[in-house]
Image (spheres, coloured by chain):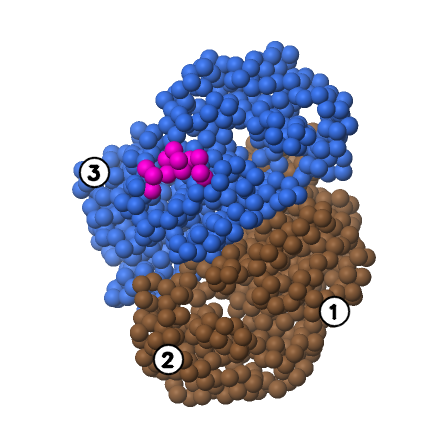
Chain colours: A brown, B blue
């Protein structure tokens, strides 16, 4: 990390102001500045266009690589790259390893306006420069999309852009990146995030409006304070919907749409979802579908949402016929995780989230399991000051899974369903009233661990460790005593069933899991 | 085209059955068969794994390229490629130029099952083969995604897969591809498509169910016949919703969701939208959001839908506050264009679609304009037998635009709004009652052409040609006589306005257009 922070590379289309921004940024950081194209010109004594014209693009790219190689051996520097310098996978990887890569952005229309007067750009001497710009941007998209830190230069001077980069450099270095091509986004871990909130938002959004969605409970606790703060920077409209899963439906969505229309939300207006899983799901879905998609920000206020539902882009609502039947995969622009917000959670809600934390340890990470065994008491009592590391670890696992299987088509995301097959069945059989989601999956995990003994030879001791951990977290282990027939009937309603079998998640050992299609009959035999 | 059809290359992950399918396919086509890996083994006298182990992957890839080069010079052949042979952009392009590239597919779980017993695959000796498969698939996704013809091998023998490829080879050769990475899809142009319908669907979908969405008018004309045909292959549930834009709302969506739940639609069940723009928009949106996304098929039954709304993935519904305020960008799995379906259209609906056809000529294609000038009468009178070429041309333009600007973020898609700024204003001012969409944009195009004279020096003669063409199509040209103030007020409600300006589309000449931000005041001066 320390070595990687020695250099900043500015990439971007011509007209995004790489050189000017770079010069200002170098001044602010007191680092040397290098303009790669200029350096090549100095070394060869020829202009870039002359090299292109006489020797062709391939020869220029070779020169560019060589010049970069010597640069990479030096110390701190801000480097303004040529517009095409990142357009090879190997070059991209090299730059990412050597430092921080930042993409400067502007809309095609803005680029056209900025470049209009520049006669040295052969591109713009063509009859339809906008189409040329769009076509070239499209060609470069696979490379530009792989750069996660993007800065809009729209309506800002190069100096302002540089100031912003300098300010957010430490924060971006620490952010967790969820890598999904052009849908990539950062998760910022910030205690008392409200203090840095407007800065973080302005780092990404330049519009004047913002739509705040929350629920009545969170609104009572944080609504006023957040509204006041956000109003320093944005025209804000707030909507607080009633709390609880039973309001996660199409009727409430219609209300949200109406409020968004009244608030004059346009395609550049971000929706900020401040709340637990229900607010995240509904806010994400409203953002996914209003005007065919606007940006959104997740600020999860429960442990469950911080480690699970706020990451991964699953959004949606329930139908009378079943949960989450309508929705979309839609990624946020950023997630803000503030563990201080957990201090106002009820103990039962803390335990509910802890079940998912224990799950990550069980399926992926024995080290995490060990940590939970040691510090469970502290975590439950004082999450605000103790849990950031654990939550970050969970988010890293979730981000890894989502990267591999964004739309749940490749089977790997299924591992996150450890304990959930029976857990969901328990929730259905008790009408979602007797247990929280976390309690239900705690019992489901205990069952799945015992099934793993039978099926995968999981050690008795591992089962005992998992159950002890659930107990320490105040979670139940013994599943309710419905008949195997009733469990079986509900298990058969699983969305991903295939003719009498479901995908069931087993442990080989703590931290190592596997998904196996399993006949319902076999599952019933362990009940 | 003839040369490109001389070879078929089968790509795909290990375990998709490339060699076996290839052998069967070669037999069916009576072409020679080549297994690339085997050929390399013969030539070098070494096994593939020995070459990998001793000389490394780079050396193997070089051998592979060389062997392919000699192959490419030969005549007809079915070639089974190694799993990694398409994993470079240059290699992909070479193969696409040299013949037809087909990707064989299977789910990671199926691959794991098929490969379980194969001890020669080092990959599968690892503790979690499923994760290994998923990770490798993810790495290859950028290359596999660029292959548009994909064949599922799920639940089919290699022979059945080969039979299917042989059957659809001529059809796939003629399909128009909309290139959007892993969201790419074909548009099939088929007269009397009902005859080949089940084959085309089975080429892509292996599940047992299908959900048919249509409207009451189309249902009366085609419902029985389509349902009977589809039921030969699928368990089909049909829902016919009332006809007309005023039913394109969230209430109707809730009804569609309910019907889909009752029909036990799962994530593999395709929704087939049989109808005009409203059915396409709602069917697409239902597919985008039910279970967070299921496949869908567009079968547009109006000219407007065939040349415009069925392509490009814009889906959604209206809110009381405005049109298309809720929706998603979501691409179909295929579009079936059958010009015979146009024979039952009313003359007014034909004219309405013709306005969009004229638009493509005006903004992109003077040759198309010339053709319309010559044959307008035939096209209007007998679209079923005369219009396929014209519709295909329009679809090609639309596909080109959508490829460059899928989510309407790059400005290029705005060109399709030629005539639409004033057209939408006219629709709003007349409450969507007096004119069809086509009539409104016909007047809008006439206005935009006159504005282009003032702003871009468009020749008077070009304006006259465009207006004569509108007249020949039976479309109005002179916009209604509202005051500039009233037009101005409505124009300001444009979704993409920026402080008093909107993006207005001008013609430089017939077939050449440009988008320029234009103050409302300036537009009013031309009214």
Q: Earlier in the sequence, mark 1 or mark 2?
A: 1
Residue A483 - label: 2
Q: Is residue B378 above or below residue B240?
A: above
Near mark 1 (Cα within 10 A), the count class, few <14, some 14-19 or many ≥20, is few
Letter of the chain that mark 1 sits on in the rendering: A
Residues shaded magenta: B215-227
Residue A501 position by quadrant:
bottom left
Kindly state the secondary structure of the residue where label 3 is placed: helix
Question: Can the viewer see residue B63 in this picture?
Answer: no
Whether the magenta-drawn stretch holds residue A10 is answered as no
Letter of the chain that mark 3 sits on in the rendering: B
Q: Are marks 3 and 1 in contact (CB under 8 Å)?
A: no
Quick one: A170 or A340, which is closer to the camera?
Answer: A340
Nearer the observer, disc 1 or disc 2?
2
Real-space Cα separation, disc 2 to disc 3, in angstroms:
57 Å
Q: Main secondary structure of the magenta part?
A: helix
Residue A110 position by quadrant:
top right
Do the dots labelled 1 and 2 sit on one chain?
A: yes
Where in the figure is residue B474, as x and y percent of width and height? 53, 17
Indicate the quadrant containing the N terminus of chain A: top left, top right, bottom left or bottom right.
bottom right
Residue A220 - label: 1
Q: Residue at x 53, y 34 (%)?
A: B401
Q: Residue at x 18, y 38 (%)?
A: B30
Near mark 2 (Cα within 10 A), the count class, few <14, some 14-19 or many ≥20, is few
């Amino acid at each position: 990390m320390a070595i990687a922070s020695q250099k900043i590379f500015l990439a971007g289309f011509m007209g995004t102001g790489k050189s000017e921004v770079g010069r200002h940024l170098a001044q602010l950081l007191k680092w040397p500045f290098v303009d790669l194209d200029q350096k090549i010109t100095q070394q060869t004594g020829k202009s870039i266009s002359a090299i292109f014209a006489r020797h062709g693009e391939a020869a220029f790219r070779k020169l560019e690589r060589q010049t970069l190689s010597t640069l990479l051996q030096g110390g701190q520097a801000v480097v303004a790259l040529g517009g095409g310098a990142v357009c090879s996978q190997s070059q991209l990887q090299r730059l990412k390893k050597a430092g921080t890569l930042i993409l400067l952005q502007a809309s095609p229309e803005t680029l056209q306006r900025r470049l209009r007067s520049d006669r040295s750009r052969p591109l713009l001497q063509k009859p339809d420069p906008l189409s040329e710009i769009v076509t070239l941007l499209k060609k470069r998209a696979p490379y530009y999309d792989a750069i996660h830190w993007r800065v809009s230069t729209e309506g800002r001077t190069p100096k302002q852009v540089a100031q912003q980069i300098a300010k957010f450099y430490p924060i971006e270095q620490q952010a967790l990146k969820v890598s999904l091509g052009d849908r990539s986004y950062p998760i910022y871990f910030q205690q008392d995030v409200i203090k840095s909130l407007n800065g973080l938002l302005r780092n990404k959004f330049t519009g004047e409006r913002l739509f705040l969605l929350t629920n009545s409970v969170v609104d009572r606790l944080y609504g006023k304070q957040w509204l006041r703060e956000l109003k320093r920077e944005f025209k804000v409209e707030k909507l607080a919907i009633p709390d609880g899963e039973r309001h996660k439906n199409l009727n409430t969505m219609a209300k949200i749409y109406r409020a968004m229309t009244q608030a004059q939300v346009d395609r550049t207006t971000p929706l900020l979802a401040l709340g637990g899983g229900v607010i995240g799901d509904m806010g994400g879905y409203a953002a996914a579908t209003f005007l065919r998609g606007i940006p959104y920000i997740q600020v999860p206020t429960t442990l469950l949402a911080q480690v699970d539902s706020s990451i991964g882009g699953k959004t949606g609502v329930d139908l009378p016929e079943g949960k989450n039947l309508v929705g979309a995969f839609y990624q946020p622009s950023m997630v803000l995780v503030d563990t201080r917000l957990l201090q106002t959670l009820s103990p039962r809600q803390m335990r509910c989230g802890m079940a998912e934390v224990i799950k990550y340890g069980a399926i992926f990470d024995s080290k995490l399991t060990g940590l939970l065994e040691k510090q469970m008491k502290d975590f439950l009592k004082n999450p605000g000051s103790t849990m950031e590391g654990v939550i970050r670890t969970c988010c890293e696992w979730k981000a890894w899974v989502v990267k591999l299987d964004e739309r749940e088509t490749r089977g790997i995301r299924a591992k996150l369903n450890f304990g959930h097959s029976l857990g969901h069945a328990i929730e259905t059989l008790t009408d979602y009233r007797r247990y929280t989601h976390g309690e239900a999956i705690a019992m489901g995990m205990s069952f799945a661990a015992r099934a793993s003994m039978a099926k995968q030879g999981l050690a008795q001791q591992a089962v005992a460790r998992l159950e002890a951990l659930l107990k320490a977290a105040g979670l139940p282990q013994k599943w309710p005593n419905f008949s195997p027939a009733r469990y079986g009937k509900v298990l058969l309603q699983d969305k991903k069933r295939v003719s009498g079998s479901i995908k069931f998640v087993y442990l080989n050992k703590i931290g190592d899991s596997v998904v196996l299609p399993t006949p319902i009959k076999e599952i019933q035999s362990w009940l």
